[in-house]
Image (tube, rainbow, N blue to C red):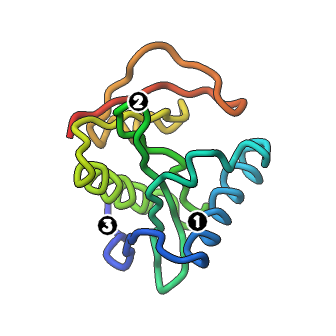
Amino acid sequence: MSNHTSNITVKLVETEEDMEAAVSIRFRVFVDEQSVPAEIELDEYDAVATHAIALEGGQAVGTGRTYFEDGEARIGRMAVDLSHRRRGVGGVILRFLEEEAKSQGATEIVLHAQDYVKAFYAAHGYTEHGDTFMEAGLLHIEMRKSI
């Protein structure tokens, strides 16, 4: 499989414009595509999380965030625009967020993976914990990775 990620850069969200781009991607993926209620897509963790965006040619094409809760690093709100999926963008974002969490003192990452993308996280070293559960109307599984 060819690697199309060489022209993708991932950076921290630092400006209002960056955050608006990240939120736009999340709304397109979660609200429009997956019918997550708009009122729960943005949450209290957005204010404290470290957000990242993936750019291609200056255009935001993916996003994700990491934050600490109860002493654990969590990664979430991973979203890639439909036109850029299956090209390695998610993996680049995930590695960037893992490094960011590690730099903030994390030794383990916890995430809630949608059931249909758990193989993606497994391929990046995450293992399933516990049973599947419903979150935002979608089937999820907790996954963990030591970093």
Q: Is residue 12 above or below residue 79?
A: below
Residue marked by disc 2:
70
Q: Which secondary structure lies at badge 3?
A: loop
Give the image location of residue 5, x and y in percent. Answer: 35, 70
Q: Which secondary structure lies at badge 1?
A: helix
Give the image location of residue 137, x and y in percent. Answer: 72, 30
Q: Residues within 10 Å of mark 1 (few under 14, many from 20)?
A: many
Of tags 3 and 2, which is closer to the observer?
A: 2
Residue at 65% of width from left, 46% of height from top?
Answer: 43
Give the image location of residue 56, x and y in percent. Answer: 46, 79
Disc 1 residue type (three-letter) = Ala
Residues at marks 3 and 2 touching, judged by CB atoms closer than 8 Å: no
Q: Which mark is residue 129?
A: none
Residue at 43% of width from left, 56% of height from top?
Answer: 90
The Cα atoms of the two marked residues, 2 and 1, are separated by: 25 Å
Disc 2 residue type (three-letter) = Asp
Nearer to the camera, 7 or 36 = 36
Residue marked by disc 1:
22
Q: Residues within 10 Å of mark 3 (few under 14, many from 20)?
A: few
| Sequence-first tag of 3 and 2 | 3
Side of 27 where 49 appears, left or right? left
| Sequence-first tag of 2 and 1 | 1
| Sequence-first tag of 3 and 1 | 3
Disc 3 residue type (three-letter) = Asn
Q: Which mark is residue 3?
A: 3
Nearer to the camera, 5 or 21 = 21
Residue at 32% of width from left, 59% of height from top?
Answer: 96
